[in-house]
Amino acid sequence: MEWKMVRLKDLGDIITGNTPPTKEKSYYDSKDVMFIKPDDLVENKVNLIDTSNIYISKEATQKSRFVPKETLLVSCIGTIGKVAILKEDACFNQQINAIICDNKIINNLYLAFYFLKANNYLKKIANAAVVPIINKTNFGNIEIPTPPLHIQEKIAAILNKASSIIDKRKKQIQELNELSQCIFIKMFGDPVKNPLGWECKKLNTVICKIEAGWSCEGDQRQRKPDELSILKISSVTKGYFDENEYKVLKNNQEIKKYLTPNKGDLLFSRANTKELLGATCIVPKDYPFFLLPDKLWKISANFFINNITLKYMLSQDSIRNQISDLSTGTSGSMYNISMDKLKEITITVPPNAIQLTFASIIEKIENYQSHLSSSLLELEEYYKSLMQKAFSNELRFA
């Protein structure tokens, strides 16, 4: 069946947003209409928006751009290619283009998934020197593969189902993180308040070694089996080890430090945003093909405490707040903590038998979490393949 290539401007009305004057306080006092900014959208996902961080008055809609529910939004300035479908009427700012689809020829969910698939192309045509921007003319001239409407609806349903399965898997992983935190608090209590009266020690007495990695240049692509790669800070920020967060070392680089993550290692992010500084994870197996960067430390505990208990000690908000307070940096930049300052933090040290019980429980949870993470990777690869086939007319329907 033949697919037509149709320019976006011929598939509906394209509207660029606008922000009501912020000096008019009355515009923002009322909670009548959602006002959407790119921060309300999540990358690599079709957002369905029915609430907003900002609301404006009905009067303010005359100074903005008002569109009805089911309108498609695409961020076209700054962060390019975030996609959303409104489930309520809304206004939106100038970084976003809206498409009110002609539902006789284009399905809005089909078009939303196409923009996700075409994200790299969108970034390519956003070629401004300083702030990436897709102007309205270029946006309207994007050609969209447009099969018959019933085929669009089937493709949208399949991709939406696949995306939903991925979301559920991510939620399972997150809920396991929350379960582990709850078990820690139940067994040990807050490590600063120390409600159970455990012995307290500075980290410098329970840590026998902290090793920093080495940072180098790398390519953002999938590694081949024989290639070395450098881990990204984001490999630890979820609270578990994410083996998909790496860059492949560029050829002919002299490796100045060969520090790899091995099973049971505790990794610590010594540099990041203020919120993510001090993120930790336990490595589930040996990874001889990964190198640690200098912003990730490998921490080894001594006989006073095991690595799993120490990881959850360092993950508690009360300890993370201390790490943040001891860090250096400014708003908008990356914060850092030194080894010496980290070692001065005091934690509780529960009896060894209780630590071992806790570690045994957590190992079972994290083994299952690792299984789910591997499954998530497979689902995401399948989803990418499905997206490619869907918009290349390679799917076959009964």
Image (cartoon, rainbow, N blue to C red):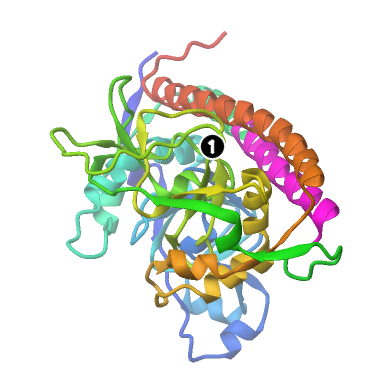
Residue 211 visible in the picture: yes
330 versus 131 height, above or below: below
Quadrant into which the N terminus falls: top left
Name, please, the residue furthest toward the left.
252
CA neighbours of label 1 inside 10 A, class few (<14), some (14 to 19), many (20+): many
In the image, is 204 to the left or to the right of 356?
A: left
Name the residue that disc number 1 marks.
Answer: 283
Residue 42 visible in the picture: no
In the image, is 260 to the left or to the right of 357?
A: left
The residue lying toward the viewer, choosing from 88 and 340, is 340
Q: Position of residue 323 (x, y in %)?
A: 55, 68
Magenta segment, prevailing SS (helix, strand or loop): helix
Residue 229 found in image quarter: top left
Tell me which segment is drawn in magenta.
165-189
The residue lying toward the viewer, choosing from 72 and 275, is 275
Q: Residue at x 46, y 61 (%)?
A: 38
Q: Residue at x 61, y 61 (%)?
A: 89
Q: Secondary structure at mark 1?
A: loop
Q: Position of residue 236 (x, y in %)?
A: 50, 47
Q: Residue at x 81, y 56 (%)?
A: 188
Q: Residue at x 55, y 51 (%)?
A: 280
Q: Position of residue 53 (x, y in %)?
A: 61, 69
Q: How many marks?
A: 1
Q: Amino acid at mark 1?
A: Val
54 is within the stretch colored magenta: no
122 versus 340 height, above or below: above
Q: Position of residue 116 (x, y in %)?
A: 42, 40
209 versus 143 height, above or below: below
